[in-house]
């Protein structure tokens, strides 16, 4: 048991959240979220995302940024499997009820394909619920789930044994507002014929649940089945809306009730000691995400005199225009004679690359998962499709540019304060440049358009895809940039980019390769795309997940030995 308030009152009624508290529906929930989030643009919700400066926590701000760019859940959320769709929508839309309503409706549409994948969140849930009923505590469920889903899941979970457990159930479509509005709890109190107060407990697994309890005037009990660290939980709450108790399992719940019964022996119909089941183990903790081992904290790099940056998906976000153009151009591969020039499966770097080639060859479009992930650039796509066939890649780039003219123009800073970071580098006396496979007609327009005032003055040099005969991953563009700066190509030149082609180009140019992991690949995936084999030897010198890590890395080199 993590903690409880000394003045906590024995419960007359115990109202439960559903997902993440009583049951585990993560598989269905995350499947539905991953189907719904790519629809944000057509739903008109991209512009409704909460500005990062208005987010409640730094984690929420990073989630907003990630979803804005990639239209999918942050990999750490997928790895930890700790948060609900309600948490996600409240984090990314704040108090915008209209946006959340549209998002919940789209989610429900997707969830219809997956619901039914439901199991008790922890072993012994039925036995613990039975003990609570035997103690005379009224039981209810309040959930943002729609009635059609909850009723069906009640018939499935634990072979339907839970259906008689609850004196009331209130779903999102039984009320007019979603949590954290208190309406769901207030309606449950009405159905239970009990008045509100601290003798009513609402037990849930999220900040939203505790906020809902606070607004309903009942005691919030935080169920930490996901295994959050105590300091992390404490950081979410103020003194006013903090939970009355934090419990790691239903065994903790029974311990707390037994403690309260000793202080008020007549409170319950049956003492907890007489009805509680044999102890069941707590919920299994999620597997931790494995972070990259090329970490700025341990790497030793030469102090940079020149830092060159990739453009797309590193300094700026132009993913929408890029993917629209790729969608438009792939059907042209037939008439361009490119279908038969794609690499053979045995020449692909990874099985995923081989599957991408096979899919494009058969359907003349990107696999839906590639578009959903939004993690690779057109340059990477062409490298996967054509390997060392430079002529085929030149034809593909030309076709891309033809279609990109219909979409380009929307360009945003990849992160907040990128401009300040670039200005800070210049104040340190570091020369700064951009290397991009984008043609100059597009790059110069985007450079002048970003953040309305443009970033033209922030760079000492820029080299575009049509400035050299060969584009990245060949080193020609990087070598031309340092030639223009009259500086030698050595490890004191850093090249920062988000793709395998960027890292290959940097290593071939003899420069320090900094992988910008904005897409948040984990260590197993990084090891797959940078295998370090004889055939694919190039690996980054360091991996940074965002520009705050990158800035810290630069400063560490600045104060370190020259």
Image (cartoon, rainbow, N blue to C red):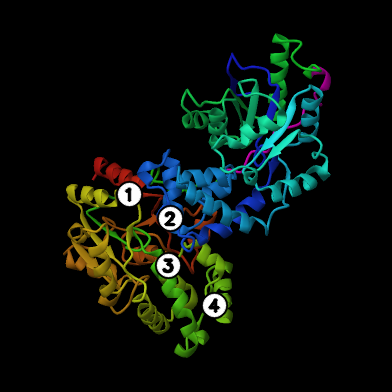
Instruction: From the image, tell me which residue sits under label 4.
Output: 360
Instruction: From the image, tell me which residue sits under label 3.
Output: 377
Pick the front one: 463 or 45: 45
Name which of mark 1 and mark 4 comes first in the sequence.
Answer: 4
Residue shown at the point (50%, 27%) measured from the top left: 241
The percent coordinates of residue 451 (x first, y second) are 26, 57
Check residue 283 for magenta coloring.
Answer: yes
The percent coordinates of residue 42 (x first, y second) are 48, 64
Q: For residue 458, which quarter of the picture?
A: bottom left
Contact, CB < 8 Å: mark 1 with mark 2? no
Give the Cα separation between the discs numbered 4 and 3.
15 Å
Contact, CB < 8 Å: mark 1 with mark 4? no
- Span of residues in magenta: 273-288
Name which of mark 4 and mark 2 comes first in the sequence.
Answer: 2
Secondary structure of residue under mark 1: loop
Pick the front one: 491 or 239: 239
Q: Nearer the viewer, mark 1 or mark 4?
A: 1
Q: Nearer the viewer, mark 4 or mark 2?
A: 2
At label 1, counting other C-alpha atoms closer than 10 Å, the crowd grade (few under 14, some 14-19, many 20 or more) is some
Rendered image: mark on residue 68: 2
């Amino acid at each position: 048991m993590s903690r409880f308030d000394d003045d906590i009152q024995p419960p007359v009624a115990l109202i439960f959240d559903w997902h993440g508290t009583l049951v585990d529906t993560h598989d269905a929930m995350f499947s539905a979220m991953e189907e719904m989030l790519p629809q944000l643009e057509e739903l008109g919700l991209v512009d409704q995302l909460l500005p990062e400066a208005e987010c409640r926590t730094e984690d929420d701000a990073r989630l907003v940024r990630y979803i804005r760019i990639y239209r999918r859940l942050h990999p750490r959320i997928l790895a930890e499997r700790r948060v609900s769709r309600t948490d996600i929508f409240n984090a990314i839309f704040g108090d915008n009820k209209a946006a959340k309503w549209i998002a919940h409706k789209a989610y429900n549409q997707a969830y219809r394909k997956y619901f039914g994948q439901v199991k008790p969140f922890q072993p012994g849930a039925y036995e613990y619920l039975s003990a609570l009923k035997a103690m005379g505590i009224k039981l209810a469920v309040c959930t943002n789930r729609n009635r059609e889903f909850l009723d069906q899941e009640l018939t499935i979970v634990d072979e339907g044994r839970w259906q008689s457990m609850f004196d009331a159930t209130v779903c999102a479509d039984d009320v007019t507002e979603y949590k954290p509005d208190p309406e769901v709890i207030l309606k449950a109190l009405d159905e239970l014929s009990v008045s509100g107060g601290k003798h009513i407990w609402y037990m849930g697994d999220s900040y939203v649940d505790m906020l809902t309890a606070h607004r309903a005037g009942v005691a919030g009990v935080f169920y930490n089945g996901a295994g959050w660290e105590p300091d992390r939980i404490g950081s979410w709450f103020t003194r006013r809306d903090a939970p009355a108790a934090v419990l790691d399992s239903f065994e903790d719940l029974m311990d707390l009730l037994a403690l309260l019964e000793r202080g008020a022996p007549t409170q319950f119909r049956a003492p907890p000691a007489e009805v509680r089941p044999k102890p069941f183990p707590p919920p299994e903790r999620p597997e931790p995400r494995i972070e990259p081992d090329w970490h700025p904290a341990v790497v030793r790099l030469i102090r940079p005199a020149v830092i060159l940056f990739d453009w797309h998906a590193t300094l700026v976000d132009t993913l929408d225009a890029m993917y629209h153009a790729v969608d438009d151009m792939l059907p042209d591969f037939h008439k361009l004679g490119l279908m038969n020039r794609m690499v053979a499966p045995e020449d692909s770097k990874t099985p995923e690359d081989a599957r991408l080639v096979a899919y494009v060859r058969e359907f003349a479009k990107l696999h839906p998962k590639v578009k959903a992930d939004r993690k690779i650039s057109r340059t990477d796509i062409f490298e996967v499709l054509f390997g060392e066939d430079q002529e085929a890649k030149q034809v593909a780039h030309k076709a891309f540019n033809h279609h990109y003219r219909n979409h380009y123009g929307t360009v945003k800073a990849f992160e907040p304060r990128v401009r300040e970071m670039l200005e800070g580098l210049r104040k340190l006396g570091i020369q700064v440049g951009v290397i991009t496979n984008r043609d100059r007609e597009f790059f110069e327009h985007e450079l002048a358009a970003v953040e309305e005032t443009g970033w033209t003055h922030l760079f000492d040099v820029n080299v575009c895809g049509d400035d050299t005969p060969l584009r990245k991953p060949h080193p020609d563009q990087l070598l031309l940039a340092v030639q223009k700066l009259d500086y030698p190509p050595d490890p004191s030149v850093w090249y920062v980019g988000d793709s395998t082609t960027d890292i290959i180009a940097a290593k071939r140019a003899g420069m320090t390769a900094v992988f910008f992991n904005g897409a948040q690949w984990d260590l197993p995936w990084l090891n797959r795309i940078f295998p370090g084999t004889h055939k694919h030897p190039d690996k980054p010198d360091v991996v940074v997940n965002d520009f705050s890590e990158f800035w810290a890395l630069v400063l560490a080199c600045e104060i370190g030995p020259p």
